[in-house]
Image (spheres, rainbow, N blue to C red):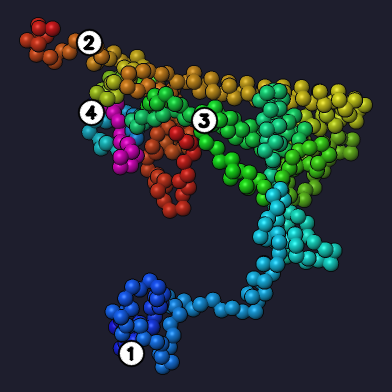
Amino acid sequence: MPPRIRGSSCQPQLLLNCIEPVPATSLSSSAALGPLRRPTTSSAPRCSQPFSTTPAPQVTALRRKFKEWCEAKQQLREPQRGQTNYVSQFIPVSESGMTRPDMPFPANKHFRSERVLSEKAREMIWRDVMVNGMPLKAVSAQYSVDMRRVAAVVRMKEIEKKWERENKPLALPYASAVTGMLPLAHLRQGEDPFEPINDIHVHSYTMQQLFVPTSESREFTRADAAKAFGDRILPPDQKMRIPELVQMEKNIHAGMSPQEARDEFVKAASESEKAYAAKQQARLQAAEDRKVRVDSGRFEFRFEKINAEDVGPTGRARRGVGWRYGVPFMDRKRGELKIPTSVE
Amino acid sequence: MVVKIRLARFGRTNSPFYNIVVAHARTARNSRPLEVIGTYDPIPKKDPYDTTGRLHKDIKLDTTRAKYWIGVGAHPTETVWRLLSMVGILPPKHRPGAPSTTAPKGQANEA
């Protein structure tokens, strides 16, 4: 049975008490509404929340003190541009005084907000790569910015410049507001390195303790160690993003002047990038060679040459072409990833 | 029994996708065929980052097996004939621009 409205709460007097009193100036003739504007009587409870059953927020001592503190702090009312303005800046939490400026939460000293590249730094990276033609690896090593980030900065800058050429509006006020509130890295000389650039992913296979018998006379290198951990484990020299830096340090150690070693490094980096580009180009060319393009007027039909025997003896091999027989297709199953992998 | 080269429709509602199969003529459309020699995606697609708006259709085909099956007397359906004629395995049946053979005589004389 649904809940009933009690008769006593439907009294006209109670309902009228819940309506906010109209200011007298807005009424032209008070005589017509005279009987309705009766003074509130003490017998009826005053209704402060006419349309909501949520209780009004209680003004506690803590809340009052917080409000007073907020009003007393100048920084909270007028945040300064060019710095983070985190609360932790004016709350002493330790005996040594204020916390570091990159700590947003004063009680959580492990949470640090990372620096972002400033507009000038990004422009500098883009200029080095696209105008001066330096290899990505050299730019990454020069500014201590991860190679993937360098590539991303260049891509984003290219889009930005394209939009400028097309007179598309840029959200510059938003960008400046956000960068004004974040810790920035300007990539100047003498500044702390922005991030580690040559980190190596630690494969879980290499986390185990291993005893490999080997003869004393044999030179046991890192490549041998990798082979001992597994057939597919790469030695660290092949896993790092910029292995040319190792050679540069070796050259300096062998007595080469730093400037000369750096030139060698840039040369090697450039060559490795050229080799990578050539490999990509060859891959694309091979894919193109497998194709025959026939233009029918409306559409271009692209015939790709395949091998029908890739399906294997059971017809279920992964490399096989076409919809498979006898196996469910899980594309609509719950929990399957349905994120598109290409944008058109 | 006649061996045909035909299409087997897979995919979903409103998003067809065909296997180009070699199968006996009297077997069901999506039953396991003698061989899958390719696929045909009939939905026209754009190239990524292409601004010209040109559309293309992707077909995968094992031309060697297709030639073999034609050589041993498999009958391609009309659609498969059209596809195979594009890569020169079969002569085209309907040529764009060629005079229509089905047109009535009177119209042909007027033209």
Magenta-drawn segment: B3-16
Q: Quadrant of the N terminus of chain A?
A: bottom left
Residue A57: x and y, percent? 54, 76
Q: Are dots 1 and 2 in contact, CB under 8 Å?
A: no
| Left or right: where A234 falls relative to A171 | right
Q: Most prominent secondary structure in the magenta stretch?
A: strand
Q: Are marks 2 and 3 on the same chain?
A: no
Q: Amino acid at mark 1?
A: Ser
Q: Which residue is mark 4?
A: B1
Residue under mark 2: which chain is it in?
Answer: B
Seen from this angle, which residue lies furthest bottom? A43
Residue type, label 2: Ala
| Residue type at the position of mark 4 | Met
Whole-angstrom CA distance, mark 1 to mark 4, is 89 Å
Question: Residue at image x 33%, y 30%?
Answer: B42
The local crowd at label 2, few if under 14, some if 14 to 19, many if 20 or more residues have their Cα within 10 Å, is few
- Disc 4 sits on a residue from what chain? B
Q: Which mark is residue A45?
A: none
Instruction: Give left or right: position of B30 versus A175.
Output: left
Question: Tag 3, which secondary structure?
Answer: loop
User: Which secondary structure, mark 1?
Assistant: helix
In the image, residue A274 lies at what x, y percent? 67, 22
Q: Nearer the viewer, mark 3 or mark 4?
A: 3
